Image (cartoon, rainbow, N blue to C red):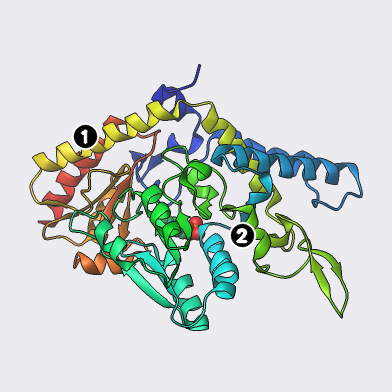
Amino acid sequence: SKKMDIEQIRADFPILHQQVNGKPLVYLDNGATTQKPQVVIDALANYYRTTNSNVHRGAHTLSDQATQMFEDARITMQKFLNAEKSEEIIWTRGTTESINLVAQTWVRSNLKVGDEIIISGMEHHSNIVPWQMVCEQTGAVLKVIPVLDDGSLDYDGYLKLLNDKTKFVAVVHVSNALGTLNPVEDIIREAHKVGAKTLIDGAQAVAHWDVDVQALDCDFYAFSGHKLFGPTGLGVLYGKEALLNAMPPYQGGGEMILHVSFEKTTYNVLPYKFEAGTPNIAGAIAMAAAIDYLNSLDRVALAKHEDALLARANELAAQADGIRLIGTSKNKASVFSFLIDGTHPHDVGTLLDQQGIAVRTGHHCAMPVMEQFDIPGTVRASFTFYNTLEEVDALFKAIEKVKMFLL
Ligand code: PMP
């Protein structure tokens, strides 16, 4: 049976059991990066201890073993996302690199002057800047879906932006700053009706729920391993095989070629065409360990637990004075972004840290949406399944102390 006892699960994460600034650590910065279960740490260490070799070189036993583990990890990821083929899983450095890859390959080679790319007003900078760069390169135009006051997407506004010039739609699945869960299935379907391709920034979604790329019917899906209980420096780009085959390579180098001569180079087949250079072998193997771990959990029950954490935070916020919530849409992940009237988020963050509570403060790499709400930033507590109701209570006790200190 699958695991859903929170205390048992917490025992799997060694970092959680320590004091910070003399107080028990309350880690509420899971949107920035998630902690790693022991099995992931072990997978990394064991790989370097017993198997470390380069992959796809085939010259010796350890290299064969490393290659096997690396490619098995790809299949684990394929199944996790329900991709049709393992060739559709490209290992990257993270969400940022995955998005830049698509911008500089499919989009750069297919868009021309006057074509349109649609993003939303709640995007992370990594789903804004790569599109601005490719607009400069191609003469395409960037269009932005408005965000409503509750932090949800203006869906009718999106429909109005769609037209026969729309060639690409890139939207965040779950906003890191607001927690908003966007109706990406509808967004993708409507984009396809005008012949546009789609990319979903799943950086904040994959840690909360299972994602099925075939059910979504997205053309590309991007995320980072480190936000999914895996290592840093390892990310995923899912792409539909036909598109990946049709688009030019991103970086040139070893691995991504079949044959090189000074006259002409031919490129490797998928997925290697997009994996120039020695990949993050240990990272991919540890990522697979993280997914095996997630598969041992009852993720549906844990998502309900996360909803309960958010509900408790909302309830305590309503009882407290002077707390302003940013991002109150009905459909959201367990991201609790707020301000305390009369205080600056950075001061609140510092004083929470002194009480052992780790949150993120600032603009969350989403300056445009902060501007829309006319705020310098927020304090963000982002919960995951190993957080407890007691930790939410601890956050609010600490908030009262912060208020006494600052107000
Ligand atoms: N998109 C979203 C929604 C994010 O939350 C983040 C990370 N904060 C990113 C993209 C970028 O991820 P990374 O820095 O791991 O490339």
Question: Going 61% across and 42% down the picture, which residue do you hit?
Answer: 77
**Is 235 rendered above or below residue 120?**
above
Residue 352: percent from left, percent from top: 27, 49
Q: Name the residue tied to disc 1.
A: 312
Q: Nearer the viewer, mark 1 or mark 2?
A: 2
Marks 1,2: beta carbons within 8 A:
no
**Is 134 rendered above or below residue 344?**
below
**Is 317 rendered above or below residue 101?**
above
Q: In which quarter of the image is residue 20?
A: top left
For the question of whether residue 376 can be seen, the reply is: no
Residue 309: percent from left, percent from top: 28, 34
* Residue kind at label 2, given as amino acid type: Leu
Judged left or right of residue 81, residue 73 is right
Question: Going 47% across and 63% down the picture, which residue do you hit?
Answer: 196
* Residue kind at label 1, given as amino acid type: Arg
Residue 65: percent from left, percent from top: 81, 40
Judged left or right of residue 108, residue 371 is left
- Alpha carbon of mark 1 to alpha carbon of mark 2: how far? 44 Å
How many neighbours does mark 2 have within 10 angstroms: few (below 14), some (14-19), or many (20 or more)? some
Q: Which of marks 1 and 2 is nearer the N terminus?
A: 2
Along the viewing direction, whichever of 19 and 210 lies nearer the viewer: 210
Question: Which mark, by number, is residue 243?
Answer: 2
Along the viewing direction, whichever of 98 and 306 lies nearer the viewer: 98
Along the viewing direction, whichever of 152 and 42 lies nearer the viewer: 152
Quadrant of ligand 1 in image: bottom left
Mark 2 lies within 8 Å of ligand 1 (Cβ measured): no
Judged left or right of residue 391, residue 55 is right
Q: Quadrant of the C terminus?
A: bottom left
